[in-house]
Amino acid sequence: MTATTMTRAIDDTTSRTAARTAGIGYLAIFVLAIFANFLVRQTMIDPTDAAGTATNVSESELLFRSGIAAFVVIFLVDVPVAWALYVVFRPGGALRSLLAAWFRIVYTVFLGVAAVFLFLGLQLVTDPAGEAGNADAGMLMFEGFNYTWLVGLIAFGVHLILLGRLIVKSGLAPKWIGWALTIAGVAYGIDTLAYTLLPNYASIAGVMLALVAIPSVIAELSFMVWLLLTGFKRSPSTAS
């Protein structure tokens, strides 16, 4: 085996390891996000009913704490995922891949801060010696989580756009996945801007949810499957 061949073999192994890491991380994030966001947060927090939300959280405190813990784990897992994606797509452009990774890290920081708002809200609505206004204060904290996360999702959207364009230009992954990621990234940005600029956002919340959910689920699930298939693919040397 020549030095060049050995270097290529090492690079291939490193890339597959990184793809495997990113794919497993993405899978964990999907499972945890479904639990934390849809099964816990959205079923227990009603933005129009502070008292009812306080009751829901107080009566299912352990479940709510589990949701917060899931968000914290997502915060931790996203860091190695950002690194792994940088390694996988570095051959297509090291600087562009690094920039995409940094935007994912920025999003991750916002998610970590947002999780703190959830915990503070929990403390307020479950305080046995709390005052009558604690439910409203807790709701303000829960809204703080929501908007902090939404601002972070702009950075996540930029990450997806940069990653998608990198895939399209480099051909390191199927180009249709690159375009799908780009569309999903744009959708994240539109949703956050609409939430910020439109006073009547609540009236179109369902439409905006579909606008974001459909392209993002299709794009990121497809991307996750590609990462897992690439990561667990046997190398030519192993296959032979």
Image (cartoon, rainbow, N blue to C red):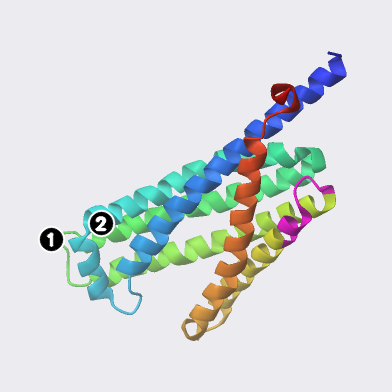
Boundaries of the magenta span:
170-179
Left or right: 205, with 235 as reference point:
left
Q: Is residue 1 toward the left or the right of residue 26 in the image?
A: right
Label 2 element class? helix
Residue 158 on image: x %, y %? 67, 58
Placement of the C terminus among the 4 image quadrants:
top right
Q: Quadrant of residue 237?
A: top right
Q: CA distance from mark 2 to mark 1?
A: 11 Å
Q: Earlier in the sequence, mark 2 or mark 1?
A: 2
Query: To which quarter of the image does residue 178 belong?
Result: bottom right
Q: Position of residue 54 (x, y in %)?
A: 23, 68
Q: Is residue 60 above or below residue 28?
A: below
Residue drawn at 35 percent across, 58 percent down = 118
| Left or right: 6 as drawn, with respect to 109 | right
Q: Which residue is mark 1?
A: 129
Asked if the magenta segment contains residue 37, the reply would be: no
Which residue is label 2 attached to? 123
Residue 45: x and y in percent read 32, 69
Is residue 227 visible from the viewing direction of this image? yes
Q: Amino acid at mark 1?
A: Ala
- In which quadrant will I find the N terminus? top right
At label 2, the amino acid type is Gln
